[in-house]
Amino acid sequence: MAEVGRGTVLAGRYRVLEPLPSDLDGVSVWRATDQILDRPVRVRVLQSGDVAPALDAARRAALVTDARLVRVLDVGTHEGVGYVVSEQIVGASLAQLVEHGPLTADQARAVVGEAAAALEVARRRGVHHLALRPSVVHVSADGRVLIAGLALDAALLGVPHGDAAATSRRDAVDLVRLLYTGLTGRWPADRDGVLQVAGMELAPVLDGAPVPPAELAAGVPNDLDTLCTVTLGGYEDGPHSPGDLVHELEPWGEIRVGRSADDVAARPGAAAAAGSAPAEVEAATAPVRVPRQSVRTVFDEAPPGVVRPGTPPPAAPARASGLPTSTSRVERTSALPAAGAVGAAGAGAAGVGATHGAPAAAAPTLPASLPPVSAGHGGGGAPSSVPPAADDDAWGTAAWGGDDGGDDPFPFEQDEPEGRRRFDPTAVVLVVVGIVVLVGLVFAARALFTLPDGGDPGGGTQAEEPAAPPSSAPPAEGEEPAPEEPAAGGPPVVLGIRTVNPTDPAGEREEEVSRAIDGDPASFWFSQTYSRPDFGGLKDGVGLEVRLAQPTAVSGVTLLVNGTGGNVEVRATGGDAPTTGDVLASGPMGPETALTFAAPVETDVLTVWFTELPTMADGRFRIELTELTVG
């Protein structure tokens, strides 16, 4: 077996540079560089222990894609030594973050919540961590959570794999242990003692369970204290999967405690500053109060004449109440110039306008001795006189026609006949819509109460009844009874479909299985990808449970599959026991696989069980089912 040290080049590609700390026996961690892609990487060299299962676990972890899981880049052996190459970790671990004191409650909630969300993604792909501890959870300087050692560390520690419920429960409990560590700075040891955390103080134990975190640290919220107490107690209570823990912790805020892995606060004075660090973090994480103001308050407090936020510009001001009432509609035809230009506009005798949208106080003033102004209502005649521009005295009430019912002083305003009012099409549109709806109801009623052949519902049915042969007529002598028609109850109608995975009750890519019956060959359901057609030796097969709307005579199943090869069986059984019952049809798969039964079977559930995987174009093995039909 080769010895790996500084300068060693693994597989002719990864040059080992310097060692990094490792908390697992028989495993050395190195900072390295990928000489082909010229990028920094992290290499774990497996020197002893169960190397083969650990490499298989790393390959399974590489299939899970999530930004919060350390990505596995390569797995292999070099001169008898196994290695796992992953992306470089730049964030400090949870153990480093709590060296000088626990985190605040909101930061512990956010860090563990992000970790739980990432492990829920892995759980739905059938991969579990099973070896969570403070050294594998990292928080970068920009607030990103990274989890290392998915599936790999458990294989190196020899953690046994149980069923799906047990493995999900173990990850959920270990996540609560990390929450306890973030709140108190102490590690609550697990009961079986598999996970040993060096260099961290253990939590005190009372009656076989860790002391509640609220008794060790101040400011722990009641919900987090209760969550840790009931989960780490002896009653198998609390969340049973990382997804359950996400629902317990959400919502959480932004993470602000992250830092670089090299920043360990080793400079002078760091110890003195450590005592004030929690208080500073607590002050920084205090909620920011945003002053709120209702729309009603804005309108009540705004002074007159101020444009209020969110409101449209004001409309044109109404005429003064002193104007005479007219039965004609008045329409403005020009805009009023500024007050200083009144005289110039009057010299042309073409008319004086009023600025639309300007306040009424901005109107020009005319002298009180202004002679009467005549305006041709309906004729558009010019005024007989124009007010002088030099006098700025206010208009009298008579100038507005307040007492003598005088004419409108604006010659450019013309009365419009009643017949030229603007046409409002609303009534016509409503009438047309009503007619269309009525016609539609008539056609719908005719289609509903008319037989397909166009006959009357009452007479047509009675005329056809004698033509139907009696169902109870005995067969002729020596003649076998005719079999029942398979389609007597109509064609099979698929009510629903779900995946069947013997290693995971949640199924296999359950969220995409409806694509197999959506009628669109461009979409498809696909299984996990394996290195061998026998599911990598991990399971006997995967299946699809097809539920029909009612018990129906079924003659066969047709599958449209991408890839080549593989094998499939069809059984009239449910997904809870997919391999029981008689095999109705089986055979190899191709682009279009028609599985016809020897005789029609009346059932309301079928299980399509894949015992061997097809080969994809990339040389790996998985199922890509574009369409499934039942006939």
Image (cartoon, helix red, strand yellow):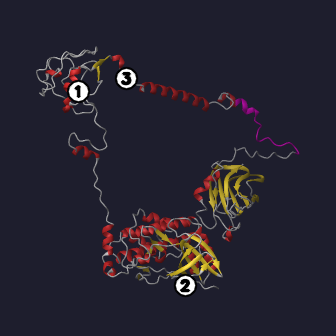
Q: Residue at x 50, y 25 (%)?
A: 435
Q: Position of residue 44 (x, y in %)?
A: 56, 78
Q: Quadrant of residue 201?
A: bottom left
Q: Which residues are magenta?
A: 462-478
Residue 151 appearing in the image: no
Residue that badge 1 annotates: 319
Q: Position of residue 143 (x, y in %)?
A: 42, 67
Q: Is residue 504 left or right of residue 108?
A: right
Query: Which of disc 3 and disc 1 is earlier in sequence?
Result: 1
* Amino acid type at mark 1: Arg
Q: Quadrant of residue 459?
A: top right
* Amino acid type at mark 2: Asp
Q: Is residue 216 magenta?
A: no
Q: Position of residue 137 (x, y in %)?
A: 47, 73
Residue that badge 2 annotates: 25
Q: Are marks 2 and 3 in contact (CB under 8 Å)?
A: no
Crowd around label 1: few <14 · some 14–19 · many ≥20 (10 Å): few
Helix, strand or loop status at disc 1:
loop
Q: Residue at x 76, y 41 (%)?
A: 471
Q: Are marks 1 and 2 in contact (CB under 8 Å)?
A: no
Q: Position of residue 153 (x, y in %)?
A: 55, 77
Q: Residue at x 38, y 81 (%)?
A: 266
Crowd around label 2: few <14 · some 14–19 · many ≥20 (10 Å): few
Locate the N terminus and report the quarter of the image it occupies: bottom right
Query: Which of disc 2 and disc 1 is earlier in sequence?
Result: 2
Q: Residue at x 46, y 84 (%)?
A: 198
Q: Which mark is residue 422?
A: 3
Helix, strand or loop status at disc 3:
loop
